[in-house]
Image (cartoon, grey):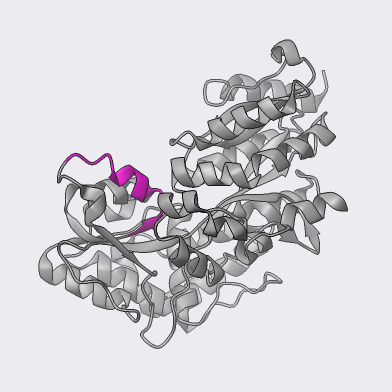
Amino acid sequence: MSTSLRTTVTICALLAAVTGCGVGDSGSTSGRTLNWYVFNEPGGANEQAIKTCNKEAGGRYKIRYQRLPTDANQQRELIVRRLAAEDSTVDLVGMDVIWTAEFAEAGWILPWEGARKKEAIAGKVEGPRKTVEYKGKVWGIPFTTNTQLLFYRKDRVKKPGKTFTWTQMIDQAAKSGKAVEVQAAQYEGYTVWINSLIAGAGGQIADQSGDVKVGRSAGTAASIIKHLATSKAAPPGMATNKEDQARLGFGTGRSNYQVNYTFIYPSADMVKSPKNFQKRIGWVRYPRTVAGKPSRPPLGGINIGVGAYTKHRDLAFEAARCLAQPKNQVVASEKGGLPPTTESQYDNPKVKKALPFSDLLRVSIASGAPRPVNPAYSDISLAIQKTYHPPDKIQPGEIVSKLRDRMKKAAEGKVF
């Protein structure tokens, strides 16, 4: 047995309980089963997309849902293990937008060329389109996108103005004895917040070539985070809170403000107390870092890539196009609260009904702050998280030099 195959079998044995390997178990469509490794979307949107495409395929292929964890760090860890082992069962990959450069540089995904390239990016919103591009090539097809909004309790507080800042929000919340819900655990979601704060102050972590560009805006971001963490507006468990803890905290009534992704809106309809909770929620654009500059909301989402080691390349490209087609994007909006990547779908009545803030989303996504495009991004992100954690212990005056040093080491593959 080759080293590569032995590694693959070992990984399958270790991970079967989490995702299922799918090796030698293709049923009546033997040789044409396509495994789609993607996060476990709780609303059922991915299952519906698979059902639709399997029906449209007419027996030519059958997509199998291989569920990855909802945590972005765990998703990447599991799929990287498989791709590094040249696992041929990885036909389709639901990729976080930040994985493109790393996976392309490693040769783990296939480029979309010729007519396929045109199909992948045709009619797509600019922000999501750019997330599949790396070194002049296209490496996936945008499926869903996402950004964060500021959700607030409109039955408790006035609608925030267009120039509403993080500092204003924190001070108002602290004065009222209510929390501000954020994501500040040491994981990718924390990097997302930090990156948007820095971009909102007019700075950046790294440029498009990957060169470190840490400046004073990193200190501004640190001051805001520490201000919240050491104020009465800090939510319980802030240093370990992720998206779902923020959603749940907002639902309990402990906070008047929540910065989060749009998935929280459909789920708000399930809150039993207070009654009609969803109707009590208002929304505005992401808060400003500084008063004189527009905010730079986070930019996230899922792209679909084709695994480099798949035995069914043509079918995998066809299935990826099917999964990402507009009608499946609409279902993702309805079931998962996930915005579409196709520009025209923002005018779709079904999307507008599912996401009543769709017009704001379109503007927010267009002005979103992309995270650094770099093959070493996972190490860069870890360096950011370590430098800013825990939130209440940050030293804003020291953050710039410390972050710059760690970022450079991360980009060079050195230990930090």
Q: Which residue is drawn at 16% across and 61% down?
A: 155
Give the image location of residue 366, x and y in percent.
55, 69
The x, y position of residue 182, in whole percent, is 33, 59
Q: Which of 79 and 383 is in front in this view?
A: 79
Residue 386 visible in the snapshot: no
* Residue 197 falls left or right of residue 82: left
Side of 61 relative to 372 (left or right): right
In this view, 156 is above or below 114: below
Does 18 appear in magenta? no
Left or right: 268 in relation to 122: left
State the residue in front, 413 or 96.
Answer: 96
Q: Quadrant of the N terminus?
A: top right
Q: In this view, does 58 lie above or below 197?
A: above
Rendered-image quadrant of the C terminus? bottom right
Q: Quadrant of residue 64?
A: top right
Image point (61%, 60%), residue name: 343
Question: Looking at this rendering, what residue extends furthest in the left direction?
Answer: 176
Q: Give the range drawn in magenta.
A: 259-272
Q: Is residue 270 magenta?
A: yes
Looking at the rendering, which quadrant does residue 341 occupy? Answer: bottom right
